[in-house]
Image (cartoon, helix red, strand yellow):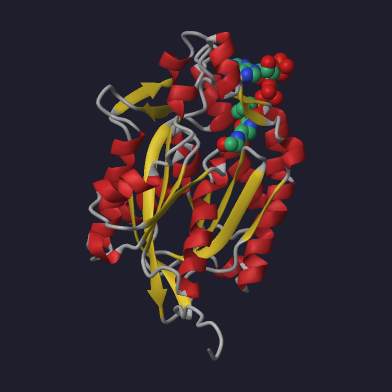
Amino acid sequence: MTGLKASVGSPYARILSVGSAVPSRVLDNEQMVQHIDSSDEWIRQRTGITERRWIAEDENLETLSLAAARQAIERAGLTASDIDAVLLSTVSHFRQTPALAPQLATSLGIVDAVAYDISAACAGFCYGLAQAEALVRAGQARHVLVIGAETLSRMTDVTDRATAFLFADGAGAVVVGPSETNGIGPVVWGSDGAQADAIWQTESWEGAVESGTWPALGMNGRAVFKWATGFIAGAASRCLEESGVSPDELDVFIPHQANNRITDTLLRYLKLPEKVVVARTITGYGNNSAASIPIAMESLLSSGEARSGQTALLIGFGAGLVYAGQVVTLP
Ligand code: UT7
């Protein structure tokens, strides 16, 4: 033996396509304040949200994920047999095992796919994108389907004033594949487990069985807001630096859709010029965690506000606490 062979990948990877799916049920702020001491005006001013999408009876995490994935595969000009890895980022798959990604792959007609779930909350899509880029460049997969999908309505306590108005459902997906030029910059990512209690599931599954209480999401909004407008602003800046992109060279900014006031603070910190197109899908879709960035990307492209080939900064941040961001060329 002359030594172990190593897999040979592509010099670069890029996002080939994006798809999305949102639930059919629309809930406005008046509907959300029925069980909490709040108002449409407060929610609009403090978050930017005017309405959100929650799943209807015939919709669930799987139906949303499949719809977004099918659109992404078709738009890439590929078929199921071209996809060899499926990564699902979600915190709302309510089975410890098996993961949902293998079932999604099978439903999509993808045979023998590498398939696993990623639990990185609102940073989940950017975590998945980083892994997809690495798999393609390392030669461990050729075309990777990355799905960010959530049904957070199933984990929302509608009587909790701190969260009831915020969380929502949806799915977005991209196909990442080989490229002659680079379309995905270096990822900037990390975590801080010391802040695990900033956003949490109110009951562990064991605790839920003992108490008979279905778990919900809890959040210390102020602590997360402070971290997102401080530390995350620095991380977003590092994404630009590490990709060698100046604020003037950026076309589009797609932060996780957590709160328009967080987005505004990031914009000021990064000193992005006015010409930069900024994602604001939280207004109509709420905060749908791992789904928010690909949904916003798809929305900006299909509305014509952003164009294929433009340079976009993505940054996701959330429960863990965890974060990840990268500069990409839009598909
Ligand atoms: O996606 C994962 C990452 N998540 C995030 O990034 C979320 C980050 N946090 C936030 O977006 C914001 O903290 C919230 C939107 C959740 C809350 O906004 P805030 O401006 O931080 O509110 P606050 O907790 O500082 O409260 C401000 C005021 C208080 O009243 P006083 O003390 O000033 O009189 C609260 O009692 O707003 C009051 N308040 C509300 N009023 C009406 C708090 N919640 C509500 C409410 N409706 N739902």
Residue 226's spot in the image, x, y percent? 73, 37
Q: Position of residue 257 (x, y in %)?
A: 52, 41
The x, y position of residue 281, in whole percent, is 44, 41
Of all residues, the one furthest to the bottom in this rendering is 2
* Residue 13: image location, x then y, percent: 45, 72
* Left or right of 89 in this view: 37: right
Identify whether 199 is placed above or below 12.
above
**In the image shown, does 198 or 261 lie closer to the viewer?**
198
Report ligand 1 position as a quadrant: top right
Residue 195 relative to residue 45: left or right: right
Residue 70 vertical position relative to residue 238 in the rendered view, above or below? above
From what the image shows, is residue 314 above or below residue 310? above
Q: Residue shown at 63%/28% (left/top)?
A: 200
**188 on left or right of 112:** right
Residue under the image location 44 percent in, 31 percent down? 95
| Residue at figure coordinates x 45%, y 29% from the top left | 94
- Say which of 195 and 159 sits in front: 195
Total marks shown come to: 0
Residue 37 visible, this angle:
no
The residue lying toward the viewer, choosing from 222 and 181, is: 181
